[in-house]
Each structure stands twice: as C-alpha cells, then as structure tokens.
C-alpha cells in the first residue's frame, strides 16, 4: 500500500485531499498533519488569522467546487452559528463576501465531508491534530520520505505533499512593546491606542489591521445612504493611523466578474510551453502571454479600449494605468472606484480591463518558471505592482470603513519609496525613516506588507536542504550582456556560471511544472510535491488563494496518477 502524507491541513490540503479521494488511485493510505485543532480553515480563516470583523474577498460563486455550495451548507449549519454571524439562508447572497471565520467553518465542514467520503470508499486516512512537523527528509536509497514531528516521532511515506500555508517570522515582536511583525493573530491588536500608529503596507493585510484597531478604539454606524460614520472613544483621542504604501496607492475594489474562477481564455498547456520554448531559445516570452491573455481579451470584450492600447507594450499599458492612479489622491480614487464597483455589481457588468489583468496574472503563473531572467525582472518591477493592486479585490464594507475613518481625520496614506525603512524605538513603537532624511516616531508599528516569499535559507525543513533535495530558484538570462549589467548594478542577485552565462536568483526554490522540487542538478523529485506558497513564490508569482489550490492540486494528482 502506498503511503501519502499531507503536511498542513488548511485550504491547500483540502483541495489536495479532494483530488486524492476522487482519483482512481488504489491501495493508498493518506496521513494529514495539522499543527492546530481544525482542518480546512488554515491561518486566514481561523482564529489565528481572523476575528469577527474580518471578511473574505471572495464570494460563494467564486469558490472552486467542493462538496456543497455555501448556501446549501448554511441551510444545515447550526442555528447558533447563523445567529452568531447574523446570516441566514434566506438573506444569503452568493455574490457577496462572508465573515472569514464563518468561511473557515464552511471549509472545515467540507474537509469533514471528504473524510466521510474517504471512509465510504475504504480509503484509510489518519489525521494528526495539534502536530507540528519539524523536518522532512528524502531517503533516496529507499525511495521514501521521512517526516519528523515535534514530539520526536518519525513517520515513513512513499509520497509527501507539503501544504503548509502562511508563515510570519518574528523580528522584534515580543522584545519591543507595540512592535508587531504581522497583524496576526489579530487579537493582539485589539487594544486602546491613544497615540499615532504606523502600518507598513496598504494591502488587504493592512486593512485587516485597520478593521481590528478601529473597533478597539471606536465604533462604526451605518448611514441611510449605506455609507459609514466612525465615532472615536474619548479615551483614544490621540488615535491616528498612517498607512505607508509605495506610490501611495490603496487596493482596488471588488467588482462583478464575468468569469468567477479566473480561467483565462487560453492557459498554455505543458506541451505548448515546450513548443514555444523550442521557438524562443528555451524561454516562454512574457510578451506572448500578454498578447494571448490580455490584448486579445480586450479586443474581444472592449474594442474601443483595444484601439487605445493596441500598440502599447505591457510596460506602456502598466505605466498608462499607474499614472492615472498616481495623479489622484488615494481616498478620492477610493471613492471613485467604490462608485464604479457598486455600478458594476448592481448591473452585473465587469470592469473589463481589470478582469483581463486578473486573468493575465493567473495565466502568467504556470509558465513563469520558463521565463528568461529579463522577463522575470520586467514582471516583478513593472507589471506586478499594478496587478497586486487590482487583484486585491477590496470588499465594499472595507472601503466604507476606510472612507469613514478618513472623513473623521483618523487615517491617511503616505507615499513612500523603497529607500524608506523602519527601526524599533528604544523601548516601544518604531521610527519610520523616509527619504531626504525625514523621520517620524510612532507609538505602535505593524508590518502589514503581507506574506513574503522565503529565500532558500529560510525554508524550515533542514533535511531537504542538507541533502540538496531542493535548490534555490534561479532563471537564466537570455543575454549575457544584460546579465553582466545586472550583476554590476547590485539591484538583483546575479551569479555567473562557469560556462559564462548568468543566473538571476529568485526567492524560494525551483519546482517542476508539476510542483515537484528540483535538486541542484535540475532533477524533479518523484516523491515530493510543494504547495507551500512562501516556498515557491519566486517561480510562482501569482497565488490567487483557492484558485491556486485548485490548479496546483490538479497538476500534482496528474503526476501522481502517471506513476
């Protein structure tokens, strides 16, 4: 019997377990290792990443297929749960976002249903709750994988899928009062703050922090026109939040999506990728993906806009849209986009260029590991800044809260550049150092940039590094002249090969098209698969939540079934 392990029991493991249960694979046994007490929810949808004030940025009709839609699940959910979240089956709208903790309960229930299906199918499954995996080691001579847990116990498997999710390393948190290396778990931020607060970042992670802090220091009320007002508690008179964002931009709003599941018109197949590489000196050109999954979509859906952008390169288009955003005050733009999004949702009409940009991001993800280093630099430096803003999909209620806080004079966005830095205060808080020597002290600091990718030396499983089962992520430069220039610039980490070629170092590790780690010789490991986003973000630049889990698990089960 083949023994398979899932390391981690969150959403990635849920979709992988679904694939295993529904696959024709026979004579397998599955073990699931979860460091907490519940399967399915992971960090984002459990108390480790959410409180009652936090909401998803996806709705029921945007979730990849599981056992039952949320609406059906709600009809059977415990009455006290529905009361607790002020939601009922009749009031439920599949187009609207949900409380994250409620969504976590849904995901957990779906995991339970797949466990029940596994029992029915006589698929042996072992679940190890409250069990933290400390190491993973490939035993090549025996064609097995050894998994070690915190108690000291070890397990042997034939195949292991690493499904660990978010991770927030601590730097100064715990040693400096009111310094937080992440907003999670959010309960730590629920405190009176009669002083100025600095938040690094303005993403949805930062908005999570704002939602918690604002409720700890005042309350929102709903106005007759559906806008919000905010009243500050008297004991928090000094409360003020400064969001620090590159270019001073806030995330874009949720709008109506014609395609709820981010399925581009044409995602390159495994065979197409290699055919393209043969014609392009071993690389997949970024410009080809842009043409297929953006320009052609715009031409089909918005001919008028296409006429405006048809001669634009991807950099030209990004600059065109970014300059438009930069010219407008962050909160003025938020109000304008809020109205645009409300109209889009009410009329069930998409904002075509934004949806096309989202599907472009999704389409880029799979072939990105086949880009040249030059194209990856273009993607990271020029393209992703706009994509990351647009695909955030800020929920309407979050926008209403930000606008209410701004109307009350309690929040601002400060435009910073990459030269800005933050240092801990002497005993608490932080000093934000801006360009031109300007600096400001804040009594509280929260790093809310979001999940950062791990570099090779940050990968937590020493056994994988010690035996060189995994290798640091690199992409080759198409031009040695460009590689040499980048090496001299110190902007990126560039290595020179003995052959004279140049390599761009990326965060994380190298993986195959089927999410198998590559060793130092570029050989895919047949026993290991990596779904842990921080491990693979260098060559897997877009990871759109559950859509990523669905797509990655499909590739993995495909490879497992080929054996």
Image (tube, helix red, strand yellow):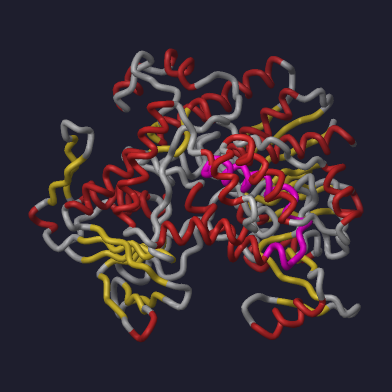
Q: Residue at x 88, y 35 (%)?
A: 562
Q: Nearer the viewer, residue 324 or 138?
A: 324
Dominant secondary structure of the residues highlighted in magenta in the image: helix
Position of 370 with respect to 345 (left or right) is right
Q: Nearer the viewer, residue 464 or 184?
A: 184
Range shown magenta: 353-376
Q: Nearer the viewer, residue 194 or 311?
A: 311
Magenta includes 355?
yes
**Residue 497 seen in the figure:** yes
What residue is at 76 percent from the left and 30 percent from the top?
29
In the displayed structure image, the side of residue 224 where residue 166 appears, left or right: right
Left/right of residue 412 with respect to residue 463 in the rendered view:
left
Image quarter hosting the N terminus: top right
Residue 478: horizontal and vertical position, in percent?
Answer: 81, 69
Residue found at x 29% / y 24%: 86
Name the residue located 16 percent from the left edge and 53 percent from the top edge.
408
């Amino acid at each position: 019997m083949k023994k398979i392990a899932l390391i981690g029991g969150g959403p990635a493991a849920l979709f992988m377990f679904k694939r295993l249960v529904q696959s024709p694979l026979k004579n397998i046994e599955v073990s699931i290792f979860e460091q907490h007490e519940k399967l399915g929810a992971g960090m984002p949808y459990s108390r480790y990443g959410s409180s009652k004030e936090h909401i998803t940025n996806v709705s029921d009709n945007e979730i990849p297929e599981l056992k039952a839609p949320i609406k059906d699940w709600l009809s059977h959910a415990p009455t006290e749960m529905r009361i607790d979240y002020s939601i009922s089956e009749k009031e439920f709208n599949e187009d609207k976002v949900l409380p994250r903790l409620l969504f976590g309960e849904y995901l957990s229930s779906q995991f339970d249903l797949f466990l029940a299906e596994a029992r029915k199918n006589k698929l042996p499954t072992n679940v190890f709750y409250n069990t933290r995996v400390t190491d993973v080691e490939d035993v090549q001579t025996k064609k097995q994988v050894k998994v070690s847990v915190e108690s000291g116990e070890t397990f042997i498997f034939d195949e292991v899928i690493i499904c660990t999710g978010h991770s927030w390393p601590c730097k100064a948190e715990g040693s400096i009062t009111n310094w937080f290396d992440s907003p999670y778990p959010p309960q730590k931020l629920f405190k009176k703050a009669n002083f100025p607060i600095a938040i690094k970042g303005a993403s949805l992670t930062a908005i999570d922090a704002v939602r918690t802090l604002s409720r700890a220091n005042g309350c929102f009320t709903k106005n007759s026109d559906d806008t919000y007002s905010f009243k500050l508690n008297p004991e928090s008179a000094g409360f003020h939040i400064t969001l620090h964002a590159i270019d001073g931009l806030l995330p874009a709003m949720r709008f109506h999506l014609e395609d709820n599941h981010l399925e581009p018109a044409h995602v390159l197949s495994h065979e197409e990728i290699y055919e393209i590489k043969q014609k392009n000196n071993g690389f997949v050109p970024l410009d080809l993906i842009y043409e297929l999954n953006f320009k052609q979509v715009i031409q089909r859906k918005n001919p008028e806009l296409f006429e405006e952008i048809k001669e634009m390169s991807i950099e030209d288009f990004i600059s065109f849209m970014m300059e438009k955003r930069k010219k407008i005050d962050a909160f003025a733009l938020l109000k304008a986009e809020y109205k645009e999004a409300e109209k889009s949702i009410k009329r069930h009409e998409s904002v075509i260029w934004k949806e096309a940009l989202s599907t472009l991001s999704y389409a880029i993800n799979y072939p990105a590991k086949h880009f040249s280093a030059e194209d990856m630099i273009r993607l990271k430096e020029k393209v992703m800044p706009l994509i990351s803003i647009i695909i955030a999909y800020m929920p309407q209620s979050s926008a209403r809260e930000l606008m209410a806080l701004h109307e009350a004079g309690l929040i601002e966005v400060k435009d910073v550049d990459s030269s800005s830095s933050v240092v801990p205060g002497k005993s608490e808080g932080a000093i934000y150092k801006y360009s031109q020597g300007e600096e400001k002290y804040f009594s509280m600091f929260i790093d809310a940039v979001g999940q950062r990718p791990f570099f090779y030396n940050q990968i937590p499983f020493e056994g994988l590094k010690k035996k060189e089962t995994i290798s640091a992520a690199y992409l080759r430069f198409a031009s040695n002249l460009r590689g040499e220039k980048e090496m001299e610039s110190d902007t990126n980490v560039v290595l020179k090969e003995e052959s004279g070629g140049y390599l761009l170092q990326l965060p994380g590790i190298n993986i195959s098209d089927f999410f198998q780690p590559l060793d130092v010789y570029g050989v895919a490991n047949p026993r290991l698969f990596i779904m842990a986003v921080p491990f693979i973000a260098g060559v897997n630049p877009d990871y759109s939540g559950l859509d990523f889990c669905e797509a990655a698990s499909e590739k993995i089960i495909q490879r497992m079934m080929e054996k």
